Image (spheres, grey):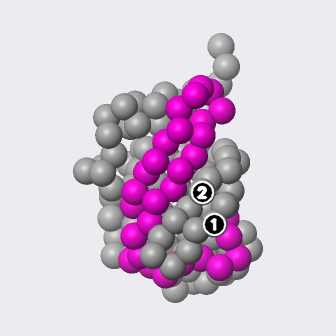
Amino acid sequence: MVDHTGQTVERAPRMNRRAAPRARVRLEAAYEDALRQVFLVTCDLSEGGVFLLTPEPPPVGLSGQITLELPTGPAILRLRGTVVRRRADAPAGFALAFDPRATPESTRRSLQRFIQSAVEPPR
């Protein structure tokens, strides 16, 4: 599939995409799946998922986990999910949709607070 910018995109079946605000943030993240363990950088982050930058995105449908430390506090978050989209063109990477059933409430709240602070303008 080709998106509106002409970039090649693979997608999983349509889900409830972008139901939550996204924060365009660059954070280091450790990503792990059955095939690899790598350190990557986020492009954007929401309560529902993350887009990670990498020249070699994993296949759509693969289950994975990220670990990241939020700059706003001592929270280290571990989030499990499924690769739902990959982009081969620049900026290459993939979208990992988080599994809400595998996300503890404390992790969800920490992520929610961080995203809210990142998308709201300072007062």
Q: From what the image shows, is residue 26 above or below residue 54?
A: above
Between 109 and 18, which is closer to the camera in this rendering? Answer: 109
Write down the residue under mark 2. 30
Image quadrant in which the C terminus is located = top right
Residue 37, horizontal then vertical, whole percent: 58, 68
How many marks are shown on the rendered structure?
A: 2
Q: Viewed as shown, does residue 97 lie left or right of 118?
A: left
Under mark 2, the amino acid is Ala
Task: Answer whether labels 1 and 2 touch (C-beta < 8 Å).
Answer: yes
Q: Is residue 80 above or below residue 86?
A: above
| Residue at position x 67%, y 61% in the image | 40
The stretch in magenta equals 53-81
Q: Is residue 123 left or right of residue 116?
A: right
Could you tell me residue 108's position as x and y percent?
Answer: 38, 37
Location of mark 1 (residue): 38
Q: Is residue 77 magenta?
A: yes
Q: Residue 25 has which mark?
A: none
Q: What's the residue at 34%, 70% (across, down)?
A: 14
Q: For the residues marked 1 and 2, what is the alpha-carbon distance in whole angstroms?
A: 6 Å
Q: How far across and down, in percent of the image, does residue 4 sit? A: 60, 74
- The one nearer the camera, 57 or 121, is 57
Visible in this render: residue 105? yes
Q: Residue at x 53, y 50 (%)?
A: 67
Residue 105 spot, x, y in % from top left: 31, 34
Mark toward the start of the polypeptide (1 vs 2) = 2
